[in-house]
């Protein structure tokens, strides 16, 4: 038995010293020190020894076990250290190599256009107001002189939330006219940007969800000439001096007189194309003098004050600003398109 223990010690120490990785090392541990290992098998033979031999062989067996355990521990440390050094060598950072510039995001074209709009109007002395997207029909229609029976109040045109048609997704940011006038006395000069919702078919210039900026000015002696001058100044500031506009008579329940303002088509220069549907002009906004009924409903004396209001479609403004030919590109989030801005 003594020869067998010495043989196991010699073979095991040699094998442990030559182990190349943790997996091989664990295999050797099981082979020699496991429950069914070679050393354990020898120890099971202790019962066949005489009383005088057992203490001697027991001591030798313990020495062999301790030697193998120590060798196993030392080899494990050496393998771990070697693996760490190898990983550090592979992952080392050469500080002399120029760093890689991280890819940064940028503003969406809609955000760019809206920020430019805000900057222009704030420069004219306007303040920015915000309001709810889920709006009362009273503010979205009734207080804006749009009575029951008006086509805009039909279920086919508006996203209603309640069956009694009292609550809806706002179709315009114009309700902010009323909300501001109810809380603030003239003079008033505000813009109200935000999302609006209408049951429009999706095409190159329409979407069921789009962005609008409502503008409102209330003061003494405000006229249609002030409205036209303000809007022309805005269009030239946004699109460049000499940009052509067209004011057309129109009708809105909450303004009188009313107009629509077009800008010359950026795609064809006024000749007529798919973008402008052959007209040479693209509608940019609706505007007009605030209807006396709207002012009186908010407690404003129409003998003293007058005002104008306008609603700008931000998507169409962005199309003209960046020469975009299809409004749907703005919402599709195609990185090939967005990365151009």
Image: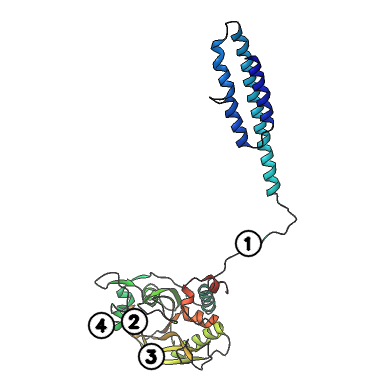
Tell me the residue at 60%/36% (across/down).
23
| Proximity of marks 2 and 4: CB atoms separated by less than 8 Å | no
Please give the name of the residue rendered at 57% of the width and 25% of the height, measured from the top-left corner: 37
Q: Measured from the top left, where is residue 89 in percent x and y? A: 71, 46
Element at label 4: loop
The residue under label 1 is: 102
The residues tagged by marks 3 and 4 sit, at their Cα atoms, a distance apart of 19 Å
Q: CA distance from mark 3 to mark 2?
A: 18 Å
Q: In the depicted view, which residue is nearer to us: 284 or 205?
A: 205
Q: Earlier in the sequence, mark 3 or mark 1?
A: 1
User: Residue reaching furthest left?
Assistant: 164
| Label disc, if present, on residue 149 of the rendered structure | 4
Q: Nearer the viewer, mark 2 or mark 4?
A: 4
Q: Quadrant of the C terminus?
A: bottom right
Please say if the residues under marks 3 and 1 sit with CB atoms less than 8 Å apart: no
In the depicted view, which residue is nearer to us: 296 or 111?
Answer: 111
Are the residues at dot 4 and dot 1 in contact (C-beta closer than 8 Å)?
A: no
Badge nearest the viewer, 1 or 2: 1
**Which image quadrant is residue 255 in?**
bottom left
Separation of disc 4 and disc 1 at Cα? 57 Å
Q: Which residue is mark 2?
A: 294
Q: Earlier in the sequence, mark 3 or mark 4?
A: 4
User: At x 55% / y 10%, what residue is drawn?
Assistant: 48
**Relative to 120, residue 261 above or below:** below
């Amino acid at each position: 038995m003594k020869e067998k223990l010495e043989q196991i010690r010699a073979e095991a120490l040699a094998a442990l010293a030559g182990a190349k990785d943790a997996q091989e090392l664990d295999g050797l541990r099981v082979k020699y020190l496991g429950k069914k290992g070679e050393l354990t098998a020898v120890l099971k033979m202790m019962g066949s020894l005489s009383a005088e031999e057992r203490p001697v062989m027991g001591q030798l067996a313990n020495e062999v076990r301790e030697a193998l355990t120590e060798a196993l521990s030392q080899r494990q440390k050496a393998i771990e250290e070697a693996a760490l050094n190898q990983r550090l060598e592979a992952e080392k950072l050469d500080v002399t190599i120029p760093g890689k510039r991280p890819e940064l995001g940028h503003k969406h074209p809609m955000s760019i256009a809206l920020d430019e709009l805000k900057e222009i109007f704030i420069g004219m002395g306007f303040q920015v107001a915000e309001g709810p997207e889920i709006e009362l029909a009273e503010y979205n229609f009734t207080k804006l002189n749009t009575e029951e029976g008006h086509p805009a109040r039909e279920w086919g045109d508006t996203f209603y939330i309640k069956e009694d048609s009292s609550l809806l997704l706002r179709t315009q940011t114009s309700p902010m006219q009323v909300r501001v006038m109810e809380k603030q006395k003239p003079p008033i000069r505000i813009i109200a940007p935000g999302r609006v919702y209408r049951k429009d078919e999706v095409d190159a210039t329409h979407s069921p969800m789009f962005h609008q900026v409502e503008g409102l000015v209330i003061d003494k002696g405000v006229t249609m000439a002030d409205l036209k001058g303000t809007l022309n100044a805005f269009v030239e500031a946004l699109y460049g001096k000499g940009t052509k506009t067209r004011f057309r008579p129109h009708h809105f329940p909450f303004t009188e007189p009313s107009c629509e303002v077009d800008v010359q088509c950026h795609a064809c220069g006024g000749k007529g194309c798919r973008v402008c549907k052959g007209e040479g002009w693209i509608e940019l906004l609706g505007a007009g003098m605030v209807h006396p009924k709207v002012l009186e409903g908010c407690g404003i004396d129409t003998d003293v004050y007058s005002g104008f209001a306008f609603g700008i479609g931000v998507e169409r403004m962005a199309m003209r600003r960046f020469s975009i030919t299809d409004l749907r590109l703005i919402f599709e989030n195609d990185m090939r398109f967005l990365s151009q801005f």
